[in-house]
Structures are given as structure tokens and as C-alpha cells.
């Protein structure tokens, strides 16, 4: 009742402007104690001695963010319970926090691994394009037609540009150059300032590739001619058993990695994320990843294929990098969420596959223990 009265007073004192779009959202603001009451009403186990803990957890993380983690603990048929359904008997906020911490630790490990992939990709693209000249990234002749030319029907008349240049100015290459230019202009890095002060603009490609983001790296790779894409793929070890570079496979991987990197950087839920950009199962895989072609479409919509690709790429880039064991052990120590491996897209025999090597220790008998891994508490963004 209190929250309804507060909303009524707000509406009386601050009438809605006429130009604000109306929404169908009608739920009231709830205080932390009212949120606890609502969770108890929905059968969340919050005894009186846990109220202070619950209030602190809601204040520290937020009801809305936590709701993405307690969703899997609701009752309901199959994998899609409705938001209004009660929680499974015995579920507490301690269970939810364990799943939240598991996901946070997963993001830290994944983000660190993608960092090593990103650094290698920057170096390879900068070196490959740089072999054509310091300003190779600005030369349309060094890229694929699909990257440097817009739709043939793009209007050309009534401008001060030639038809060819007007068309290029509506291409993905032109958009990429503008995006890269904005990032180099904003950069405060010492090495960028050095080049600007000593040589002026524009910057050479091997400097630009150190400034742009992962999405821009993925886009420029897509636009490179096949010979150059092959050089990058070979440099990352993305080849078939005969050594043929799998350029289209790598293109798909980079899109998926961009999505996962951004998910980690924004501290979003990762463990059961719906992959908007998926690894293409129709493209060939290197031998250690052949099993990905046999996964169901549902599993390709989950995080496992990208984790397997990260495991493969980090081993190619830096064989001494210790990643397989900690990520494997974290997965095996996941909180006891029903069907958690399936929700992440893992095949049943995942830890026996060559891409994971002998890294993770065997899973002990019984339910997986609670996630006690804390790593170092670093932010993933």
C-alpha cells in the first residue's frame, strides 16, 4: 500500500509530460524490505536471521540483476518457467549468490583469455595489412569488393563526388575508417600521442590496430582479401588437418568472441547466455573442435562452443597459458543448478575431448559442490 501511495503522490506532483511515450509497465517501486517480502511470498527461503544479509545483497547487487540468476530456481515445467511462479522448495538467496559468484568468476576467466586472443589478433592484422604499406587500411583496393562497395543502386547524382567515390562512401570500409578515426582521435595512449606529435595524422595501420576495439578488428578481418585473411588464420592456427586456412570459420568465431567479450565487459550474465552471435556449425573446424559440428542447434545457442574455441585459440597463441585447468575446475565446481551443463551447452563427455586436454580434475561423485572460487575479485570490464 505504501508504494502505491508514493506513486500516486509522484503522479500528482509531477504530471507526465505529453510527449513522453506511454508504457504498459505498471509495477510499483519496492523498497528492499518490500522486495524481501515479495521473495518470501514466492516461497524464497529467507529466515528472519537472514533478513540483514538479504537486504545487503539486494543493496549491493540489485533485485533486477539477481532475478536473472534466481530465475533457474523457479518451479515450472521444462526449461521455461514463467516469472510469476514460486521458487523450488528450500531455495535461498545463498544459492542465488553462489550462482552469481560462479558467473562472475567465469566472466573473469573468459575475459582474460579473450584478452590474449585480442592482442594476437591486433598484431597479426596490423602486420599483415602493414606489409602492403603503412596506410594499407585506407586503400580500398586491398579489400574485398563486398567491403568497399555499397549497393549498386546507391544514389550517385547531384553530388560533388564521382560515382565510384560516392559508392565507396556508403560502404562498410568507409564506415570502418570513420569508426577507427573516432577512436584514434579520442585515444590518450602515450604511443598514439607520440605518433601524432611526431608525424601527424593519419596513423599507420599497426598503430590503428592497437587502438580500435574488438568489433572493429572483427569487421576489418571480414573485409580483408582472402590471401590476407589466410595469413591471419594461419597465424592463429585456424587450419584444417591439411593446413588449409579456415578463413570463414575464423570470421564466425570472431563475431561470437566479440559478443562474449562485450557481455563480460558489461558484467552481464554469461553462464547461460543466449548467444546472439553464434559459432557457425556449418563451417569446418580444426581437428580438436570437430565435435562442435555434431552439437544440436540448441547447444550452439549457448556458451560452450565459444568456450571450446577460446580453449583452442589460447593453446595455439600461448601454449604455456594456464587456462584450461582453472576454467575446467570452475565448471566442475558449479553450484548445484539443475541441468547446468546442458544449460551452458556442454556435451556430456566434454572433459574427455582433446581441446580440453588433461586440464580439469575429475568431477567428484555426487552433486557438484558450491562455487567457492573467488579468483582475485577483479572486475571484468
Image (cartoon, rainbow, N blue to C red):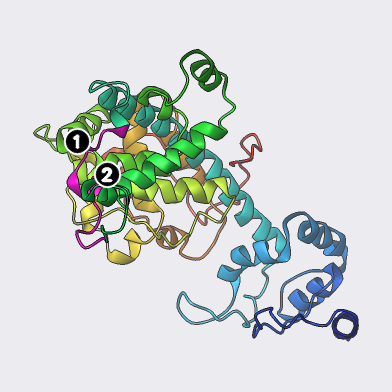
Q: Nearer the viewer, residue 204 or 126?
A: 204
Could you tell me which secondary element the residue under label 1 belongs to? helix
Q: Badge 1 is on which residue?
A: 141
Image location (x, y in percent) of residue 72: 56, 69
Residue extent of the magenta highlight: 138-154
Q: Nearer the viewer, residue 321 or 122?
A: 122
Q: Position of residue 261 (x, y in %)?
A: 47, 45
SS of the residue under disc 2: helix
Label 2: how many Cα within 10 Å (few below 14, some 14–19, many 20+): many
Side of 258 relative to 19 (left or right): left
Query: Magenta span has 148?
Result: yes
In the image, is residue 350 above or below residue 29?
A: above
Mark 2 and mark 1 in contact? Answer it, CB < 8 Å: no
Residue at 76%, 80% (x, y): give it. 17
**Residue found at the very far left of the displayed protein:** 242
Residue 222 circle label: 2
Can residue 278 be spotted in the picture? yes
- The image quadrant that residue 8 belongs to is bottom right
Q: Identify which residue, 145 or 314, lies in the foreground.
A: 145
Residue 170 place in picture, x, y as percent: 32, 52
Figure quadrant of the N terminus: bottom right
Q: Which of marks 1 and 2 precedes in the sequence?
A: 1
Q: Quadrant of the C terminus?
A: top right
Residue visible at 49% across and 32% down in the picture: 184
In the rendered image, residue 269 lying in the magenta stretch gets the answer no
Look at 56% across and 81% down and name the residue there: 82
Determine whether, in the image, residue 12 is placed left or right of residue 64: right
Amino acid at each position: 500500500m505504501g508504494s502505491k501511495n508514493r506513486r500516486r503522490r509522484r503522479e500528482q506532483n509531477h504530471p507526465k509530460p505529453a510527449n513522453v511515450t506511454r508504457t504498459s509497465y505498471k509495477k510499483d517501486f519496492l523498497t528492499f524490505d518490500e522486495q524481501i517480502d515479495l521473495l518470501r511470498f514466492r516461497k524464497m527461503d529467507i529466515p528472519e536471521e537472514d533478513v540483514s544479509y538479504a537486504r545487503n545483497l539486494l543493496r549491493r547487487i540489485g533485485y533486477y540483476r539477481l532475478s536473472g540468476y534466481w530465475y533457474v530456481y523457479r518451479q515450472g515445467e521444462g526449461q521455461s518457467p514463467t516469472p510469476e511462479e514460486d521458487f523450488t522448495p528450500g531455495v535461498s538467496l545463498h544459492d542465488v549468490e553462489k550462482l552469481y559468484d560462479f558467473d562472475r568468476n567465469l566472466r573473469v576467466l573468459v575475459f582474460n583469455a579473450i584478452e590474449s586472443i585480442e592482442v594476437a589478433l591486433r598484431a597479426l592484422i596490423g602486420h599483415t595489412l602493414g606489409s602492403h604499406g603503412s596506410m594499407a587500411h585506407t586503400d580500398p583496393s586491398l579489400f574485398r569488393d563486398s567491403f568497399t562497395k555499397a549497393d549498386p543502386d546507391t544514389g550517385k547524382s547531384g553530388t560533388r563526388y564521382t560515382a565510384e567515390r560516392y559508392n565507396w562512401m556508403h560502404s562498410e570500409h568507409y564506415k570502418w575508417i570513420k569508426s577507427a578515426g573516432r577512436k584514434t582521435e579520442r585515444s590518450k595512449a602515450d604511443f598514439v600521442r607520440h605518433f601524432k606529435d611526431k608525424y601527424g595524422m593519419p596513423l599507420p595501420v599497426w598503430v590503428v590496430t592497437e587502438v580500435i576495439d574488438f568489433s572493429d578488428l572483427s569487421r576489418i578481418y571480414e573485409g580483408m582479401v582472402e590471401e590476407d585473411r589466410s595469413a591471419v588464420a594461419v597465424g592463429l592456427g585456424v587450419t584444417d588437418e591439411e593446413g588449409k586456412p579456415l578463413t570463414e570459420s575464423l570470421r564466425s568465431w570472431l563475431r561470437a568472441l566479440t559478443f562474449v567479450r562485450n557481455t563480460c565487459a558489461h558484467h552481464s550474465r554469461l553462464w547461460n547466455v543466449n548467444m546472439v552471435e553464434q559459432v557457425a556449425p556449418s563451417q569446418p573446424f580444426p581437428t580438436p573442435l570437430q565435435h562442435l559440428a555434431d552439437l544440436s542447434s540448441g547447444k550452439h545457442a549457448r556458451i560452450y562452443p565459444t568456450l571450446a574455441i577460446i580453449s583452442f585459440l589460447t593453446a595455439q597463441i600461448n601454449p604455456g597459458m594456464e587456462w584450461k585447468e582453472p576454467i575446467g575446475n570452475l565448471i566442475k565446481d558449479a553450484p548445484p543448478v539443475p541441468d547446468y551443463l546442458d544449460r551452458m551447452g556442454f556435451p556430456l563427455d566434454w572433459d574427455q575431448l582433446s581441446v580440453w586436454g588433461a586440464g580439469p580434475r575429475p568431477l567428484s561423485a555426487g552433486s557438484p559442490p558450491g562455487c567457492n572460487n573467488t579468483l582475485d575479485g577483479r572486475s571484468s570490464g
